[in-house]
Image: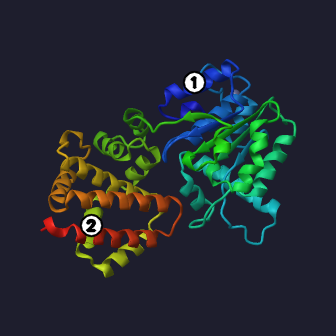
Amino acid sequence: MRFADIPGLTDIKQRLTRSVRDGKIAHAQLFMGREGALNLPLAIAYMTYLHCANRGESDACGECPACSKNLKYIHPDTHFVFPVSNVKGDKDDDRFRADMMKSWRTFLLEQPFGHPGDWTTSYGGEDKTAIISKDESREIVKALSLKPFESPIKVMIIWQPEAMHPSAANGILKILEEPPQNTFFLLVSNNAERLLPTILSRTQQVTVPLLADADLDAFLLSREPDKNRRGKAVADADGNLRLALTLLESEGENLHESLAGWLRLCYKLDAVKLLSLSEEFHEMDKLKQHAFLAYALKMLRETMLARAGADELLRSRDAEQQFIRNFSKVIPLPAVEEAYALLNDAAAMLERNGSAKMIFMDASLRLARSFEKHAAAVN
Ligand SMILES: [Zn+2]
């Protein structure tokens, strides 16, 4: 991954490359961003730039021996730490580690913009809590105690440091504060508020925003030539590239019909149909579950805006506008607000790899109860 492979984010890219050219590189940096921010690709491009033997003003060369290894994720002086769940089976530690590293490389190559749930799914660890164990912190210290093999520097990328077991986090405090010479830590987090203050205080923070619509649109151009379809995915994704890709893929699976159907069943409190819908939801792949909830949240947000009379802020169009207007006529505002909060919780639980069926059914029943409670003004 080079900077050129990542759309937009020009300011941050410039700041990062300048710090290298000026030789002012903090020894521990935290790349933080919301779910969907491209902080992992950015940290990887930065690592590639740091190692490059022939770097240009704005990017790594992509051709020197260091680049060619880093583009395949096999550079011996680049180390990756990432959470895994308990899928070890009967393997011994070394074999397990080697297998995970192989899965990790495949994940980075095949899903360069993937998120934590994609990673868990890709190695078959779905629905389990992935963590960075205490053993892993020992491996970090061990890997960094050796001299670099090929490069003048070593880079340690820790993805989702918030998933570190507290004993693992405590195990790296010392080396994070005083790393060996020419060693750089890049921590990459989508939940920096869950990090221990002792970790936070030892890093320099780099905030990675979500993509601007224009940059996302330009990126999608090669995959979706149709301007309208692309524009719709961009509007729905709110700067989240991975979500935009999923939305384009699920195009044609009329999300707005599915959402309307679901809300109708909640409204009627049809428990039998809601249960079978929960089962269908469970069978969908993770990306689509995520896309569906993101879409539902967007539509509720739009409904709140419509209720507030802020029509000019609405990003949806045509059939969806009609849906929003109808929905906001029959469902009172407090119920829409409650529904939004409920689905936000459901999306967060899904992110943490909870059971999709349970989450969906639970959200359905809560929605049903909320609609019932606020039913006074409803047809
Ligand atoms: Zn290079």
Rendered image quadrant of residue 374: bottom left
Q: Can see residue 98?
A: no
Residue 222: x and y, percent?
42, 39
Which residue type does callout 2 highlight?
Leu
Q: Is residue 1 above or below residue 292?
A: above
Give the mark, 1 or 2, whose residue is nearer the N terminus: 1
Residue 213: x and y, percent?
37, 36
Q: Residues within 10 Å of mark 2 (few under 14, many from 20)?
A: some
Q: Is residue 333 above or below residue 201?
A: below
Dot 2 lies on which element?
Answer: helix
What residue sits 40% from the left and 57% below the top?
344
Q: Quadrant of the N terminus?
A: top right
Asked if the residue under mark 2 is in contact with the one under mark 1, i.e. CB atoms within 8 Å, the reply is: no
Q: Residues within 10 Å of mark 1 (few under 14, many from 20)?
A: few
Rendered image quadrant of residue 363: bottom left
Residue 63: x and y, percent?
69, 29
Rendered image quadrant of residue 47: top right
**Which numbered tag is attached to residue 15?**
1
Please state which of residues 173 and 13 is positioned toward the viewer in this rendering. 173
Query: Does mark 1 have its CB less than 8 Å from ligand 1?
Result: no
On the image, numbered disc 2 is attached to which residue? 263
What residue sits 73% from the left and 38% below the top?
69
What residue sits 68% from the left and 37% below the top?
202
Quadrant location of ligand 1?
A: top right
